[in-house]
Image (cartoon, rainbow, N blue to C red):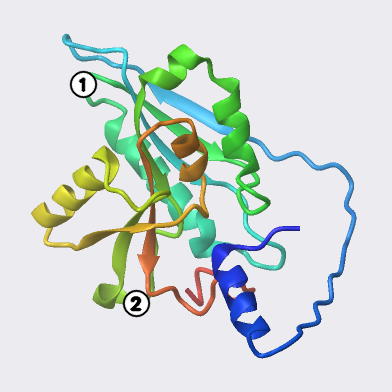
Amino acid sequence: VSLSGTQGQALLGTLEDGPVSVRLSVVSTVTAYSPNVIASNPAKHKDATDQIVMFTAHLDSVANAPGANDNASGIAGVLKMARILKSHQSVREVRFALLGAEELGLIGAYNYVASLSKDELSKIVAVYNMDMIGTSFGEENILIAWTSDGQRNIVTDTAVAAGARLSSAVLPSRTTRSDHHAFHQAGIPAACFLRLPMEPYYHRPTDTIEMN
């Protein structure tokens, strides 16, 4: 059984007022399978290197939540990048990964990272992870570039610079709660892009295109 840092802090705060009872309901399920879908656009520039830049997003949602923002928006972002870059003469391979079972503990991301050789891992220089990049809040909503340790890296720096050129704020922050964390633990610069404030439809049946 695990808790997020936010949930854990809330529980600690409650414990300060006295004993707390917790009811845990355990439901067993049959073995299920969740795919990782990987595509690549090879380096095509005359000065091509063996470096790899990745765009990632998780495929799954939680039970009873259609997942329009979490995470169809992220998938749409990765597909859009693939469409834009398909004919780009890049000096690096650009790899696109739609990863399974993120909501169950970043399972698809850890599986993918574990499948790569040390040599291939060393070639990945940046991972842009798209998780809930849509918003229904308009200009009141800000795109956050989350890293696992809260430190800026090449992913956050390039995103902040792009945001400045577009007059659109991109702010760095810290979280381990998305697929970027699996790459971070392998020593790869990575960040998760997610918008704040978060809509009230998060992980709810109302996370639909019509409502959100």
Q: Gap between marks 2 and 1, in whole Å?
A: 36 Å
Tag 2 residue? 137
Q: Is residue 165 left or right of residue 100?
A: left
Is residue 203 something one can see in this rendering? no
Q: What amino acid type should be assigned to the residue bearing mark 2? A: Phe
Rendering coords of residue 148 (x, y %): 43, 49
Rendering coords of residue 46 (x, y %): 17, 9
Mark 2 surroundings: few (<14), some (14-19) or many (≥20) residues within 10 A: some
Establish if 177 lies above or below 189: below
Mark 1 surroundings: few (<14), some (14-19) or many (≥20) residues within 10 A: some
- Residue placed at 41% from the left, 41% from the top? 79
Rendering coords of residue 90 (x, y %): 23, 22
Establish if 148 lies above or below 21: above
Q: Is residue 139 left or right of residue 150?
A: left
Q: Quadrant of residue 110?
A: top right
Q: Nearer the viewer, residue 3 or 48?
A: 3
Q: Quadrant of residue 31?
A: top right
Q: SS for tag 1?
A: loop
Tag 1 residue? 89
Rendered image: mark on residue 28: none
Q: Nearer the viewer, residue 132 or 80?
A: 132
